[in-house]
Image (tube, grey):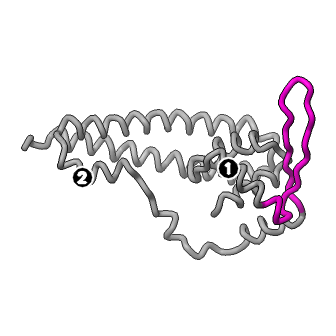
């Protein structure tokens, strides 16, 4: 997937401002695809130049002016083409880049307390992420009237994937903490 396909998919639901797209992207797709605010706007400009989007400037008296983006027929065709094309690189779903795991790999160079601090920090992040997934599930239920049953099911499945991955991370880090606590000091 690329950022443009995620943005096209969201605009396929309804026209939105760049701000609203960024916000929705982060709460709905952000658990498996990260994008910076500047990347979203850069991608929107590129897609508008390709003819996949149009934008309308909305003048507001009491707020800053805004730009509302809409998907075009060409954009919808590009999105549907991407969505309908079988994934050829399923292995990419398993690729991760983790500074945390890189640090842990080399943790033999630091003391036990520092390693435990690193693991406890990760544990705290996992707990917070679990709360976020609960909120995502709640928002899917709240938004259900706005989407078809098929869309709600797709949203639920991706949230379930994130939730299960987080549970696995939590179980792993708890085991890692116990392992390091039981490790003899050098």
Q: Which part of the image, by quadrant, shows the N terminus? A: bottom right
- Look at the picture and state if 96 lies above or below 28: below
Residue 76: % across, % down:
83, 63
Q: Nearer the viewer, residue 62 or 11?
A: 62
Report the side of 177 relative to 162 (left or right): left
Q: State which tag comes first along the sequence, 1 or 2.
A: 2
Q: Which mark is residue 116?
A: none
Task: Give the residue pinned by disc 2.
Answer: 106
Asked whether disc 1 touches disc 2, contact meaning CB atoms under 8 Å apart, the reply is no
Q: Secondary structure at mark 2?
A: loop
Q: Residue at x 30, y 49 (%)?
A: 103
Q: Indicate the quadrant where residue 113 lies.
A: top left
Q: Indicate the quadrant where residue 142 lies.
A: top right
Task: Give the residue pinned by disc 1.
Answer: 155
Q: Residue at x 65, y 74 (%)?
A: 86
Q: Can see residue 3?
A: yes
59 inside magenta stretch: yes
Q: Which residues are magenta?
A: 47-72
The 10 Å Cα crowd at callout 2, few under 14, some 14 to 19, many 20 or more, is few
130 inside magenta stretch: no
Report the side of 128 relative to 7 (left or right): left
- Look at the picture and state if 133 lies above or below 103: above
């Amino acid at each position: 997937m690329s950022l443009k396909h995620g943005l096209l998919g969201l605009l396929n639901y309804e026209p939105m401002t760049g701000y609203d797209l960024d916000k929705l992207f982060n709460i709905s797709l952000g658990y498996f695809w990260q994008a910076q605010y500047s990347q979203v706007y850069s991608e929107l400009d590129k897609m508008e130049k390709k003819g996949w989007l149009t934008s309308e400037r909305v003048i507001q008296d009491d707020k800053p002016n805004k730009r509302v983006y809409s998907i075009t027929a060409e954009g919808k065709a590009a999105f549907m083409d991407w969505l309908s094309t079988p994934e050829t690189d399923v292995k990419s779903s398993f690729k991760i880049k983790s500074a945390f795991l890189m640090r842990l790999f080399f943790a033999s160079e630091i003391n036990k307390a520092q390693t435990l601090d690193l693991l406890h920090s990760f544990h705290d992040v996992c707990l917070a992420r679990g709360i976020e997934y609960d909120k995502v599930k709640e928002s899917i239920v709240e938004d259900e009237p706005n989407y078809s049953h098929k869309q709600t099911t797709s949203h639920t499945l991706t949230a379930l994937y994130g939730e299960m991955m987080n549970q696995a991370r939590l179980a792993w880090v708890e085991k890692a903490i116990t392992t390091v606590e039981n490790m003899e000091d050098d």
